[in-house]
Image (cartoon, rainbow, N blue to C red):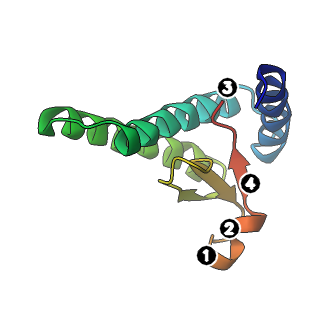
Amino acid sequence: MRRESKETAKRENLVLLASLLGGSTDAPLAMQDIARRLHRAYERQCNENMDERTEKRLEARIEKDYFLAAGIASRYSLHIYHNTDPRGWPILLSRQPITRDALATSFRVCPY
């Protein structure tokens, strides 16, 4: 993906995310930052050979970031799905509970 495309995707996603979060400005930016950190962490888990200490630190960071994202989602009465596959977007949000069948219709948070 070209750099312009990533920037465009991030900008468009931010506008939609702000709408989903009731016009807030801080929460959508925080959610995108968390999504970016999670995405990078999952890429590292997939692509790097890590010693046990490094892996535990990374898992602790993932848990902390997911907790932060879940807190933001709950503040806006949203359900959250945590996608650990580095090929996809790491955070999906929905006003309805997210099931496997509903993944395609859930709102994705841009990790770029």
Residue 82 x %, y % = 51, 56
3 or 1: mark nearer the eye? 1
Q: Is residue 55 left or right of residue 74?
A: left
Q: Which mark is residue 26?
A: 3
Determine which quarter of the picture holds residue 63. top left
Spatial separation of the CA atoms under disc 3 and disc 1? 29 Å
Spatial separation of the CA atoms under disc 4 and disc 1? 14 Å
The residue type indicated by label 3 comes to: Asp
Instruction: List the residue tagged with mark 2.
Output: 103
Spatial separation of the CA atoms under disc 2 and disc 1? 6 Å
Query: Circles 2 and 3: CB distance less than 8 Å?
Result: no
Crowdedness near tag 2: few (<14), some (14–19) or many (≥20) residues, C-alpha within 10 Å: some
Spatial separation of the CA atoms under disc 2 and disc 3? 25 Å
Crowdedness near tag 1: few (<14), some (14–19) or many (≥20) residues, C-alpha within 10 Å: few
Residue 32 x %, y % = 63, 33
Which residue is rendered at x = 68% and y = 67% of the image?
A: 103
For this rendering, which residue is in front, 45 or 8? 45
Determine which quarter of the picture holds residue 67. top left
The residue type indicated by label 1 comes to: Arg
Q: Is residue 98 left or right of residue 7?
A: left
Residue 58 x %, y % = 29, 36
Instruction: List the residue tagged with mark 1.
Output: 100
Instruction: List the residue tagged with mark 4.
Output: 107
Crowdedness near tag 3: few (<14), some (14–19) or many (≥20) residues, C-alpha within 10 Å: few
Q: Identify the element where label 3 is drawn.
A: helix
Image quadrant occupied by the C terminus: top right
4 or 1: mark nearer the eye? 1
Query: Circles 2 and 1: CB distance less than 8 Å?
Result: yes
